[in-house]
Amino acid sequence: MTDPDRAAPALVAVVFNPIKVDETRIRTAVGAAATRAGVGGVLWLPTTVENGGQSQTREALAAGATLVLAAGGDGTVRAVAESLRGEDAELAILPSGTGNLLARNIGITHTSLDVACAIAFQGRTRAIDLGVAVATDASGASVEHAFLVMAGLGIDAALIANTRPRLKRRLGWLAYVDAGFRALPKSKKVRIGYSLDDEPARSAHVSTILVANCGSLPGNIELIPDALVDDGMLDIAVLQPKSLFGWLMIWRKVTWENRVLRKSALGQRIIRITNRAVRTELSYLRGRSVRLTVEAPEPFELDGDGFGHVSTVELTVEHGGLRVRVPSAAR
């Protein structure tokens, strides 16, 4: 249910990516929803190539906005959330762009702008976790960023770097398939050192390692089925395929086992019988923090955007660090 004691905000801000949204359409939909909700005013702040939403969100907060709508893809949502960290304000999502991964994982539709606007103004507030990554490059310079979906080191970051922007705008998340076909033949495994929480450091020879806050992807893919956005934990997927057959085994697991078989007792028995082979190809870990190191700088990504090459990444989770509007019926 909506909160009956929650007063309508005096000022709402919309941080939008003008490349990925229809500005006229979104102004009309947001304006109508804001009027119905009794909102005092709406501040419109477009993102730019130089700034994806961080400074716009800070401007909104300085103006007194207590609700910030992020209209764009996962990159826009991540940038807005990064500047909402530690602030007394809420995030609402108007999905657009490629993946809309956080929106999908918390039940916000990406097919109806009017419904998304209704959730923004009339949905309930849910506290979700915020991932924090401190990345250090070969020169020793460190930078800190927030993330909401997942961080990746290895081939997935290289895949993102290889994705053609024009194709991504036309095909959405399917553009990553094109990039994958170009990246896989050139890919090599990476020796990664990793340590969970206070445990001793270990190493693995991997194609990629993913640190996730949520685990459902487009295309009926359950990459990390036990990942929850509000459990105070990071879920880590370690991919170590030894051949093309290994990649096929991983694909079978994330599209069939994780999504279908594991939901029934019979399916779980089948998984126990057949899962021995894929267990070495794809393994899962959990922790409140993880430290990753590589022998030579490797590409790094957060929520589908590349962040250059890094030598070390320290990732932690801020439990309940972000308040976001979700459907009233959602958990």
Image (tube, rainbow, N blue to C red):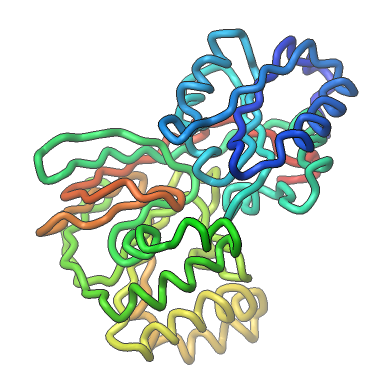
Q: Which residue is rendered at x = 36% and y = 45% of the image? A: 288
Image quadrant holding the N terminus, namely top right
Residue 198 drawn at (x, y percent): 22, 46
Q: Which image quadrant is residue 221 in? A: bottom right
Give the camera-side residue of 68 and 4. Answer: 68
Residue 24 visible here: yes
Residue 133, horizontal then vertical, whole percent: 32, 40
Task: Locate residue 66 relative to residue 182 in the image: left or right.
Answer: right
- Position of the C terminus, as image quadrant, is top right
Q: Is residue 265 above or below residue 317?
A: below
Residue furthest front in the image: 166
Q: Position of residue 280 (x, y in %)?
A: 32, 80
Q: Residue at x 18, y 47 (%)?
A: 312
Q: Answer with left or right where residue 12 lies relative to residue 140.
A: right
Q: Is residue 285 in sight in this rendering? A: no
**Vertical comparison of 242 with 54: above or below:** below
- Viewer-proximal residue among 89 and 78: 78
Residue at position x 22%, y 52% in the image: 292
Front-lying residue, 51 or 153: 51
Which residue is at 66% across, 38% downward? 93
